[in-house]
Amino acid sequence: MAFSYGFFNAKNLDRTYTAKNFCDYLGSIICNGIQDNYGQCFKLTKDKLKLTIGSGKAWIDGHYFLSDTPYTYDLSSYVNESLGRYLSVGICCNTGENYRKIEFEILAGTPATSPSIPRFKDTETKTYLTLCAIRIDAGATEIKVTDYRENTTYCGYVRCILGKCKVTDMMSQLAEITEQMKNYNTTITQLTNQVSELTTKVDEITGDVVSVGKCGNDINYVLYSDGKLILKGTGAMFDYDSSSNVSPFNDNQNITSVVVSEGITAVGEYAFQYCNNLKTAVFPTTLKTIKRNSFMPHIDEYMVHQNLFGLTEITIPPKVTEIAKFAFSGTAIKSVTIPASVSVVGEMAFSECQKLETVRYSGKIISDRMFVRCIKLKNFTITKSTTEIVGGCFNYCESLTLITYEGTISEWNSITKHTNWDGHSSSTVDSPLVRINCLDGYMEYVNGEWREVYD
């Protein structure tokens, strides 16, 4: 019976370690596969009879293989004019004493009427990761590629911590845990509503009621002398406008807070417009829609520069699916989290929020000029739930130099981005936004274009 141990500093060369020692150690905590937070993860691209394998990094039995540029194979020599065939393309780790290297390898199958896919076979000195199988029909001018990178039988992605999770999954999970902490605001909102309901009952007994009325088919309101406004009921609020059908709360400077109780599903159009002293709004978990101009304070030239009025804090409940145009425009909020449930956002929904500093965005779309002229905005995080960024959304955000994206560069590039999404195409003021931090590197704005930089 023998013991082995390591790693320790050597004294007079009494501790020596080989590559095998390190590979055995790394192989015990890093499973074989493609490292999914480096480069293009060996992305497979075909062009007629050519196959291009993108940059990437792989681990095989504790050994690593890194390709920092795309590599192209011309497969025209494998075309048989009479019969079809398959090829397998993989990464081979060869530990043989005369080789000691890792490289791409092509295994050609036999041409046949019904060809079969050739399979790499591991040996004592060779271990394979199969990237794809390629079908080349008789006399073909184009190849057909079957991607095996996700297939754990043939390849798969690196899973660390004894095979529990992929690298980017682990990093994303860390971000999700942080977000889950914020999601406890949902519970806090429910408790706050319950406290508000109890307070309301006390106010109904001891407080001075200023006004009562209806603001929905099944919604009633009570406004107290201390400025608290309570909405009770179910369903959606009425929609209002700025002229013929004015909200009962319009331009009411006595309202300082509003509690929208559980059961209410929508805040109506223009509901609280010009309520400049309305500082806090508590929303129910049943809320799904926040309609246009609902909380927009009165803005004049002085207020644009001082931004003293309107809401100072909000929490968007996790079931909200729509935030309409100008909904929170011009308010004094300092931070906001947009949940993944939000799929529809109107133009300029948070424009002119000149105290807004921090945004965490999980909604599907960042809309037209959504954060225009948010001059103090400097902390902006986008999660992998976002799929589209519309033009002008960051125009005149003079403090926003970088965005944090909780995904890879490849995932960032897959987001649909409209012209002038970053503000650099603005005809008046150029945007200070020059960097997008991703899990595997960052995007850098240089000489008028965004370029990829991998860690």
Image (spheres, helix red, strand yellow):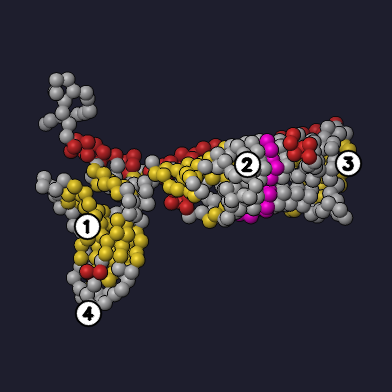
Residue displayed at 23% across by 43% down: 63
Q: Are marks 4 and 2 in contact (CB under 8 Å)?
A: no
Looking at the picture, how far across and down is residue 304, in whole percent? 75, 39
442 displayed left or right of 339: left
Vertical position of residue 224 compared to residue 349: above or below: above
Q: Which residue is mark 4?
A: 82
Q: Which residue is mark 3?
A: 211
Q: Upstream in the sequence, badge 3 or badge 4?
A: 4
Q: Upstream in the sequence, badge 3 or badge 1?
A: 1
Please tell me whether mark 3 or mark 4 is closer to you in this view: 4
Which of the 4 image quadrants contains residue 165? top left
Q: Which residue is mark 1?
A: 105
Q: What amino acid does circle 2 point to?
A: Cys
Q: Main secondary structure of the magenta part?
A: loop
Q: Residues within 10 Å of mark 4 (few under 14, many from 20)?
A: few
Q: Upstream in the sequence, badge 3 or badge 2?
A: 3
Q: Which residue is mark 2?
A: 397
Vertical position of residue 389 compared to residue 187: above or below: below
Task: Determine the CA span between mark 4 and mark 2.
Answer: 63 Å
- Magenta region: which residues? 343-356
Mark 4: secondary structure:
loop
Mark 1: secondary structure:
strand
Q: Is residue 284 visible?
A: no
Please tell me whether mark 3 or mark 2 is closer to you in this view: 2
Residue displayed at 58% across by 55% down: 419
